[in-house]
Image (cartoon, rainbow, N blue to C red):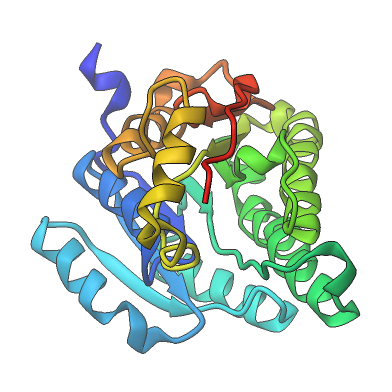
Amino acid sequence: MSSLFDLTGKVAVVTGASRGLGQIFGRALARAGADLVITSRTVESLADFAQEIESLGRNVLPLALDLRDQESIQSMADRAFEVFPEIDILVNNAGCNVRKPALDVTWDDWNLILDTNLRGTFFVAQAIARRMVPRGYGRIINIGSVTSVCGYAGLGPYCASRGGVKQLTMSLADDWGPHGITVNCLAPGWFRTEQNKVMYEDAEWVAYLSDRIPLKRPGRPTDLEGTVVFLASDASEYVTGQTILVDGGISTGAVRALPKR
């Protein structure tokens, strides 16, 4: 049974790996045996993580990637396939967010978020899938969010982008399923990252958040590791087009009273 989750000999591309969830995903895949292509907007920001992956005995290729630049996407894919002719796994993780009330969102805010989180996700998947299709094998994991299925104030464009990733995942699963490629969406709930760390400095807010989560705590890095390895491995061979929420149950819709200030 354990061999179903063994990624030895596999190669995975993990985008947005200079910090946060991207490193959690990359580390889990490397520990399961995969070699990695890791990306960020600047190669320099990947140096420490690349060294960590090498210390695990894995091969690693750091590459620059700007999700808003089509040439950058193609250049990344070309270089990745030049070094690793067969890429088995894509974790489409890179993204961004701007937190603003809906009335304050600008045209540029909208374009930044949607171009990065939705358009970028599609064209990275397309660039990698072009070489997966002839092989008849691939595991594509698009990273969504609890906002793929739930809406929150102050996150209009972000929720739109993550909902789009969920729908995109189903479309690509249908498109590429006949070629042996599974496409799924891993949707984390509330995890502390560089993007939202300021919120976690408010103990009262964390207590309020935890009360809304059936498991009574925000997510920990280890909570995501098993799911990403499962979706990347042969254990998920018959799972495609799915959005798997790793959110402690907050998407059940539990509501608590706001704390008094």
| Residue depicted at 60% across the width and 64% down the height | 95
Residue at image x 32%, y 37%?
225
The residue most toward the front is: 261
Q: Is residue 237 above or below residue 115?
A: above
Q: Where is residue 91 in the image (x, y as percent from the top left)?
A: 50, 50
Q: Could you say which is closer to the camera, residue 180 or residue 247?
A: 247
Query: Where's residue 227, x and y in %?
Result: 40, 30
Outermost residue, top side: 1
Judge whether 85 appears above or below 90 on screen. below
Q: Is residue 119 left or right of residue 133?
A: right
Where does residue 68 sit, x and y in percent of width and height?
72, 77
Please name whichever residue, 12 or 78, is drawn nearer the observer in this view of the structure. Answer: 12
| Residue at 80%, 60% in the rendered image | 157
Q: In this view, does 95 lie to the left or right of 226?
A: right
Q: How many marks?
A: 0
Q: In which quarter of the image is the N terminus?
A: top left
The answer to whether any part of residue 139 appears in the image is no
Q: Which of 82 and 230 is in front in this view?
A: 230
Q: In which quarter of the image is residue 105?
A: bottom right
**Residue in front for this viewpoint, 21 or 131:** 21
Residue 114 seen anywhere in this rendered image of the structure: yes
Taking 256 as reference, is 162 above or below it? below
Q: Quadrant of residue 170?
A: top right
Residue 26, given in percent of the width and then of the height, sits at: 33, 54
Which residue is drawn at the image coordinates 48% and 66% (left, top)? Answer: 16
